[in-house]
């Protein structure tokens, strides 16, 4: 599944040698004022972040609106206790504007980057600073190697994860399942048997979907491909495909796309409550699963964040209006494949206050503080499930913390932009509307940068 921001630094004006300034920084803020807050009991959790009072750190990201407000709340105590000021800007044009700003010499101190390919682009271009020692130690302690590798370039770790999402979910109506005595499928075969049972009943088609998303139309279909490829061929082939050592039109990839098509392009299965197979391409992804609430659809594959697309007042819970189950594995003996995504906290500067903010955002303390505010999923191993109130968020965290889970990042976000957010989206849309699998994959393969 990128107004200008100006980085400002307050000058620490002291008459004397640099050594004196360094000594004073341990007990005074960056503007020469004493920071007494760290001695307060309520600030005990931040005692290791001294010497940054009076400093400012700018952050640029795509997180906006309510999510932005919650994010700012999550680090408010850190700001109050350490005296550092975090100047955050969320933008709907982050993906394009972050490159414009960096190339124009106006880089933020920190960015939350959701595409590992962009992290690599900036790192190889010499724009990013590797994580400082404290941030790297904290990140290594709290995140698995599977996660950290996505922000590691040429052996150097440039970022730690922040928020995460789990894409391997199927949404459903608990009441509909109860009324029809349907059981939650725990294997691929059971999922297909359930789909056939619903289709044979004649009351509704089992699946509903939508892949329209403006200039990003097609991305939900790429998520289907990635999720099923993990199940159909396993993580090794998935990694080879992302790295392009297995081409897009390889028989293994064709097999996975055809398996996705056995649902998405099956007229007996889709598009419940909306139209025919082709209607998937013109149905907004936000609306793709809404027929579940109207009793016109039974199943909708979409990420954990889809909970936010249901109307206000919808109860998302195992006994609620809607809930989601894990998208079953094809061969459970090979582990629990999980497709997901998230943001990485990377730095374009490495001043002490920037490193301190990166270290804090990688900590279990921040992850739990943000979790308590709701609507949050994190792969941080230090997250206490008791702090995750939302049922689907809790289920997501449990999956991410499950040692049997085989996690892989969204493949299109790892590929060159011309493919991942270009021909892959475009050709999967054409595939939905009737293009042959091999022809679509041939076109994507031909577009891979030479």
Image (spheres, rainbow, N blue to C red):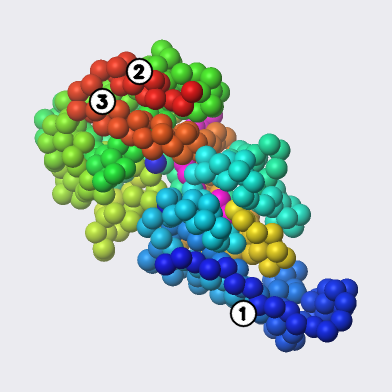
Q: Residue 83's x, y, as percent? A: 65, 79
**In the picture, residue 195 is in which quadrant?**
top left
Q: Residue at x 56, y 41 (%)?
A: 121
Q: Nearer the viewer, residue 13 or 195?
A: 13
Which residue position holds label 1? 80
Q: Quadrant of the N terminus?
A: top left
Q: Secondary structure at mark 1?
A: helix
Identify the residue at image location x=50%, y=28%: 242
Q: Which mark is residue 442?
A: 2
Q: Nearer the viewer, residue 367 or 158?
A: 158
Residue 256 x %, y %: 38, 21
Disc 2 is placed on an element classified as helix
Q: Crowding near pointer 2: few (<14 within 10 Å), some, many (20+)?
A: some
Q: Earlier in the sequence, mark 1 or mark 2?
A: 1
Residue 132 located within the stretch drawn in magenta: no
Whichever of labels 2 and 3 marks the residue nearer the N terminus, that label is 3
Give the magenta-colored segment's residue range: 333-345
Of the image marks 3 and 1, the number of the one nearer the N terminus: 1
């Amino acid at each position: 599944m990128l107004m200008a921001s100006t980085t400002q630094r307050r000058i620490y004006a002291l008459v004397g040698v640099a050594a004196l300034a360094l000594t004073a920084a341990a007990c005074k803020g960056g503007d020469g004022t004493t920071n007494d807050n760290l001695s307060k009991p309520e600030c005990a959790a931040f005692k290791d972040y001294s010497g940054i009072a009076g400093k400012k750190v700018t952050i640029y990201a795509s997180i906006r609106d309510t999510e932005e407000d919650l994010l700012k709340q999550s680090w408010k105590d850190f700001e109050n206790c350490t005296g550092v000021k975090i100047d955050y800007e969320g933008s709907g044009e982050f993906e394009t504007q972050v490159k414009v700003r960096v190339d124009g010499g106006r880089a933020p101190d920190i960015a939350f980057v959701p595409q590992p390919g962009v992290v690599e682009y900036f790192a190889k271009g010499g724009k990013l600073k590797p994580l400082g020692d404290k941030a790297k130690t904290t990140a290594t302690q709290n995140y698995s190697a599977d996660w950290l590798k996505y922000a590691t370039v040429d052996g150097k770790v440039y970022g730690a994860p922040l928020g995460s999402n789990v894409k391997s979910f199927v949404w459903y109506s608990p009441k509909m399942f109860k009324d029809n005595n349907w059981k939650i499928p725990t294997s691929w075969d059971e999922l297909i048997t359930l789909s056939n049972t619903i289709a044979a009943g004649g009351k509704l088609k089992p699946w509903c979907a939508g892949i329209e998303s403006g200039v990003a139309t097609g991305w939900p279909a790429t998520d289907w491909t990635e999720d099923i490829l993990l199940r159909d061929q396993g993580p090794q082939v998935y990694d080879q495909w992302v790295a392009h050592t297995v081409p897009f039109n390889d028989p293994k990839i064709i097999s996975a796309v055809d398996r996705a098509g056995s649902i998405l392009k099956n007229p007996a299965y889709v598009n419940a409550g909306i139209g025919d197979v082709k209607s998937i391409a013109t149905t907004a992804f936000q609306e793709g699963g809404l027929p579940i609430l109207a009793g016109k659809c039974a199943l909708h594959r979409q990420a954990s964040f889809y909970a936010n697309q249901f109307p206000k007042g919808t109860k998302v819970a195992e006994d609620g209006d809607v809930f989601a189950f894990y998208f079953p594995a094809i061969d459970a003996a090979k582990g629990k494949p999980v497709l997901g995504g998230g943001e990485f906290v990377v730095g374009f500067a490495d001043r002490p206050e920037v490193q301190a903010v990166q270290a804090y955002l990688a900590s279990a303390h921040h992850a739990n503080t943000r979790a308590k505010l709701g609507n949050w999923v994190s792969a941080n191993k230090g997250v206490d499930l008791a702090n995750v109130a939302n049922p689907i968020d809790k289920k997501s965290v449990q999956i991410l913390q499950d040692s049997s889970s085989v996690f892989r990042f969204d493949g299109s976000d790892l590929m060159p932009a011309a493919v991942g957010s270009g021909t892959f989206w475009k050709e999967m849309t054409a595939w939905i509307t009737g293009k042959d699998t091999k022809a679509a994959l041939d076109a994507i393969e031909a577009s891979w940068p030479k």
